[in-house]
Amino acid sequence: MKDATGPTKSYPLAEAALNRVAAGRIPDFSDTERTFRHLSDSELSFSAKLFGLMGRKWLTDSLATLGLPAVAYGLPGAKWMVRQTIFPQFVGGQSLEASQPVIDRLYERGVTSILDFGAEAKSTEAEFDRFCEEVKAAIRFSSDNAAAVAGVVKITGLADDEELEWANDEVPVMEGDLSDFPHLQSTLERLDSICKLAAEHNVQIYIDAEESWMQNTIDAFAANMMQRYNRGKVTVLHTYQLYRHDRLDFLKACQERARKHGYKLGAKLVRGAYMVKENEAAEAGNYPTPIQPSLEATHRDFNAAIRYCLENRDTIDCCIGSHNEESVRLTCELMWEYGMPTNAPSVQFAQLYGMSDNLTFNLAESGYNVSKYLVYGPVKEVLPYLVRRAQENTSVTGEMGRELSLVRRELERRG
């Protein structure tokens, strides 16, 4: 769940909103005592040191330039160093079984897990099959474990990037019909086997978003699967990256398609994670960038998408995948306005494991459905994900600065 956010907007609460806070409907996201009560002093101190280090750009850049090849080539001590530092902050474990203590600990706080095997893009049939089986294992694990509610599938783990890009400009996105693309049939079969298993086990499956040059193909896969498996209940949720200026309209078009074909829409709303790469590619290719003209425009469309999903709550199940406090607060306010209970089954919140605990645990304390996107897998597989977490925002006003300030405030409160 990749979420590019700016500083959270602050504004005085109206009297009605204050009453909602008092009633427990709108969580107090500044309550660090409640946020971190499951962590010991030593665990908090570890997080403070780690976030402090991650605020240093030269260090996070070194992780990419030196750490990745060191682990890839099996240099002595490289994996050990990762396991002792950044790995436990953002990864549940090296396997599903190894992640069980983390899953259980989250569940004790009322937080469920969305299981994400943290492998990067694959390129061979054997790798595609292995990734497919890993996702199925997460589904079976979730079906036997109340603390885990969903799995995640990356289409780039089931198909070669070039195949996805090749079809991108030709595939009929809104029809979801891939019958004219024989080179995509094995991918469709793998994805269908995943979604079918999820439906049989009453477990949801989230389809991740990717870069624009392969997203149309992924959108077509998602439309195909939702039409098959979202009859009556939502099994498949597709990801909408609102840092793209066309995604709000696309979300609405997907809802119209769902109504036309008689199924429910599953929508995970995120801001996005590929802004720099997308803008550079657009400039190099001399085509208009798909990215919003400003951060404010992204916030506007993201919040409009929240409102749209809740207005259509009878036919849309949504996951608010956000680290942005204003958007999370808005969702809580709208749920109150529409007379929805905090645990309304059509609304789920989610944040990445290791980040934005003030949102996650205070939502849980107020009775909302909230999960951690829990990445797991061997160090070699998940290290690229960890590098992105470290590089995502190293400025003092960004993600890591915010996390560090919250942890430090709780350490000071504990004295």
Image: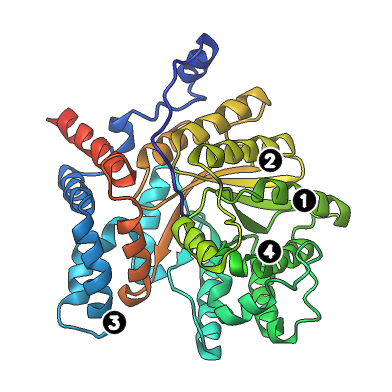
Vertical side of 27 occupied by 92: above or below: below
Decide if residue 52 is on the left or right side of residue 272: left
Residue farthest right in this picture: 260
Q: Secondary structure at mark 1?
A: helix
Of the residues shown, which amino acid type is indicated by label 1? Ala
Residue at horizontal 67%, vertical 85%?
A: 186
**Percent position of residue 228, x then y:** 78, 66
| Spatial CA span between label 3 and label 2 | 42 Å
**Do we see residue 367 in this rendering?**
no
Closer to the chain start, of discs 2 and 1, is 1
Quarter holding residue 337: top right
Q: Residue drawn 63% across and 46% down?
A: 318
Any mark on residue 253, and which?
1
Identity of the residue drawn at 36% across and 69% down? 384
Question: Where 86 sits versus 325, above or below?
Answer: below
Question: Which residue has dot 4 on it?
Answer: 219
Q: Please name the residue that numbered disc 3 is placed on.
A: 72
Residue ID at (70%, 69%) = 221
Report the residue marked by disc 2: 309
Helix, strand or loop at label 4? It is helix
In primary-sequence order, the first of circles 2 and 4 is 4
What residue type is disc 2 on?
A: Cys
**Residue 281: x, y in percent?**
51, 65
Q: What is the spatial separation of the Cα atoms under label 4 and label 3, in whole angstroms?
A: 32 Å
- Give the mark nearer the N terminus: 3 vs 2: 3
